[in-house]
Amino acid sequence: MEDDQSALYQPPMTRSWNKKLRKAMQSSGLYQKHPLDCDLLAGFGKYLRDDHNFPNFKQEVANVSRFLLCIDSTKPSLDFVHDLEKIRLFFTKLANIGQNKQTTANYMKNLKRFLRYNTTATNLIQTDRGLYEQCKHFQECLNDIQKSMSKQVSHDITGKRYTQMVAKKDFLGVIRKAMSEESLDENEQLLILYYLESLLMLKHLQRAGVVKNMTLNEWLSRESCKLPNGEKWTVIGVKQHKTGTQQVATVSLDEEEDAWLDMYYRHVQPACLQNFDDVEEDERFFISTTGRAIYNPSNDLQRFHAKFLKSKLFFLIPTPNVTSQVARHIFETNIKASFTDAEKALVADYLAHTTATADRH
């Protein structure tokens, strides 16, 4: 291509940013943790695994262990509730090395559950009433901070959705070009790919794994349905999306969105496959301009977002990397207070996880 530094250029598959962040975490001592088999942490892990059936309980226990070691390297304890300054320094350190607001919010959520375990599933209230009260007070403080963080992350989501709106005019121009059977250059092919990825992750709240693993056969096997108001929709079932649930992920598209993906399938995909002979039996629907399956939809989303904010002079808006996971979390949090149990169950079904998962947010 003419310019490898083009804003829509898709670089070779690399995890350099993740490596850099991991290196910063390591050099800051934030990957160090207390032994997970100590009574305090082992009990928390058992609580998450047995009482609440958390599939990723080990990661949550590890996060709490890292936090506890950063506060007190000698032993894991609940004494951190007496030292707000050290806690503030921990979260400041996370921000300074480049962790986004969602990571910070996850640590806070893990801490809240750790405190809830100690105040509800242990005999702390009998053995140390003063520490119990301090833990309850600290939980309230975390609730206030978490609400503030949620608003900040919601603002980040709005920024990403705004990018999608700004990009739509350019996207439709390229789609019209494709419909006229005109050839598209690599940047135009990437624009269509990135826009459709963002459509599924930000509007339809699908996991990055759904976007990455959706196959050509699943697209061709999509089912049409007609709503009572006459609207025509199509539904795609995606089996592989790398989560603890075995439930098939469903993607529902309106008539216009279905036409966009069909245009990608008929016009963009064949052009990308021209120079790639190694076609898999279970071919992926979304592929890069090299003809290979896309590697990281979340990185594509960030690249797409940065390109359009910069080109429209909105680069001064603070917009850290926002993934489909963040978008889903904000949506799930916002429906908790206003949706009935039946409505929550429908949402959980569409997002391809259990109602219990939705209730936890």
Image (spheres, rainbow, N blue to C red):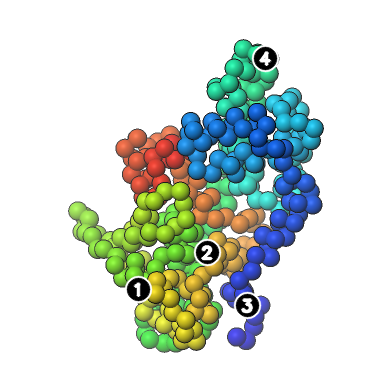
Image quadrant where residue 237 sits: bottom left
- Find residue 128 and name its label: 4
Labels 3 and 2: the sequence-earlier one? 3
Query: Picture coordinates of residue 334 (x, y %)?
Result: 46, 40
The spot of residue 49 in percent (x, y) is 51, 36
Placement of 181 over or under 87, stated as above or below: below
Amino acid type at circle 2 is: Pro
Mark 1 or mark 2, earlier in chain: 1
Q: Nearer the viewer, mark 3 or mark 1?
A: 1
Q: Residue at x 68, y 51 (%)?
A: 99
Write down the residue under mark 2.
Answer: 297
Q: Quadrant of the N terminus?
A: bottom right
Viewer-nearest residue: 273 or 243? 243
Hey, what amino acid is under mark 4? Asp
- Residue annotated with mark 3: 6
Q: Residue furthest front?
A: 37
Mark 4 lies on a secondary structure that is loop
Secondary structure found at label 1: helix
Q: Residue at x 58, y 37 (%)?
A: 109
**N-terminal-most mark, 4 or 1:** 4
Expressed as whole percent of the image width and height from the top left, the position of residue 159 reads: 56, 56
Could you tell whether 327 is left or right of 59 in the image?
A: left
Give the residue at mark 1.
Answer: 262
Q: Position of residue 153 (x, y in %)?
A: 58, 47
Pointer 2 with pointer 4, Cβ within 8 A: no
- The residues bearing labels 3 and 4 have C-alpha atoms spaced at a distance of 61 Å
Tag in front: 3 or 4: 4
Q: Is residue 56 visible?
A: yes
